[in-house]
Image: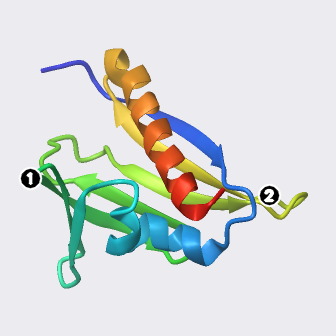
């Protein structure tokens, strides 16, 4: 058994990007392909998303989804049933801006790498959204 995974949260300011365009980025195959994976396909019946990077593919099950608000995935090959990665949109009342909160799990010694990877990917998303 390896070390147990630790949950972590990172939050990104997404400015005044529309809820629609952000939701598309985190839940629709064509949106996810712009920043998260090279190719994304969805099997609507089983709620499975297949993510591919440079020919390697991994399947994730949608375990929770609240349209325009949050979507949570569990990697099928992860034996730990309690781990997931989640994208959640929050509106900042004061400014009307939106934040994207990412929740993920990583082994303690891999956490900083995981955070850097998310930051890099979200930078790409922001670029695509013109933020």
In depth, the one of 60 and 113 nearer the eye is 113
Kindly identify the residue that appears in the image at 64 percent across and 73 percent down: 19
Taking the image as shown, residue 68 lies to the left or right of residue 78, namely right
Quarter assignment of residue 88: bottom right
Lateral position of residue 122 relative to residue 42, left or right: right
Quadrant, the C terminus = bottom right
The outermost residue toward the top is: 109
Q: Identify the colour scheme used.
A: rainbow
Say which residue label 2 marks: 92
Measure how far apart labels 1 and 2 are at the Cα level: 39 Å
Residue at the (31%, 44%) spot, across then down: 83
Quadrant of the snapshot with the N terminus: top left
**Where is residue 5 shown, x and y percent of the image?**
32, 28
Task: Please tell me the numbered disc located at residue 55.
Answer: 1
Residue 58, given in percent of the width and then of the height, sits at 15, 53
63, 71: nearer the viewer: 71
Relative to residue 91, is residue 94 drawn left or right? right
Please give left or right for residue 26 compared with residue 55 in the image.
Answer: right
Q: Residue at x 60, y 53 (%)?
A: 100
Instruction: Choose top left, top right, bottom left or bottom right for residue 11.
Output: top right
The outermost residue toward the bottom is: 45
Q: Which mark is residue 40?
A: none
Mark 1 and mark 2 lie on one chain; the one further toward the N terminus is: 1
- Dot 2, how many residues are within 10 Å of its Cα: few (below 14), some (14-19), or many (20+)? few
- Picture layout, residue 41 above or below residue 9: below
Instruction: Please name which of the two marks, 1 or 2, marks the residue nearer to the observer.
Output: 1
Q: Tag 1: Cα neighbours inside 10 Å, few (<14), some, or many (≥20)?
A: few
Is 19 placed above or below 60 here? Answer: below
Mark 1, secondary structure of its residue: loop
Percent position of residue 104, x then y: 41, 41
- Mark 2 lies on a secondary structure that is loop
Residue at the outermost right position: 94
């Amino acid at each position: 058994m390896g070390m147990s995974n630790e949950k972590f949260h990172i939050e990104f300011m997404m400015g005044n990007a529309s809820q629609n365009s952000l939701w598309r980025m985190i839940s629709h195959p064509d949106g996810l392909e712009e920043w998260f994976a090279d190719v994304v396909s969805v099997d609507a019946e089983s709620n499975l998303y297949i993510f591919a990077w440079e020919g390697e593919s991994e399947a994730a099950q949608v375990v929770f989804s609240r349209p325009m608000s949050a979507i949570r995935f569990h990697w099928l090959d992860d034996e730990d049933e309690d781990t997931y990665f989640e994208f959640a949109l929050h509106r900042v009342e004061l400014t009307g801006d939106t934040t994207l909160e990412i929740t993920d799990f990583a082994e303690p010694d891999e956490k900083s790498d995981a955070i850097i990877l998310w930051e890099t990917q979200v930078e790409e998303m922001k670029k695509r959204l013109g933020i």
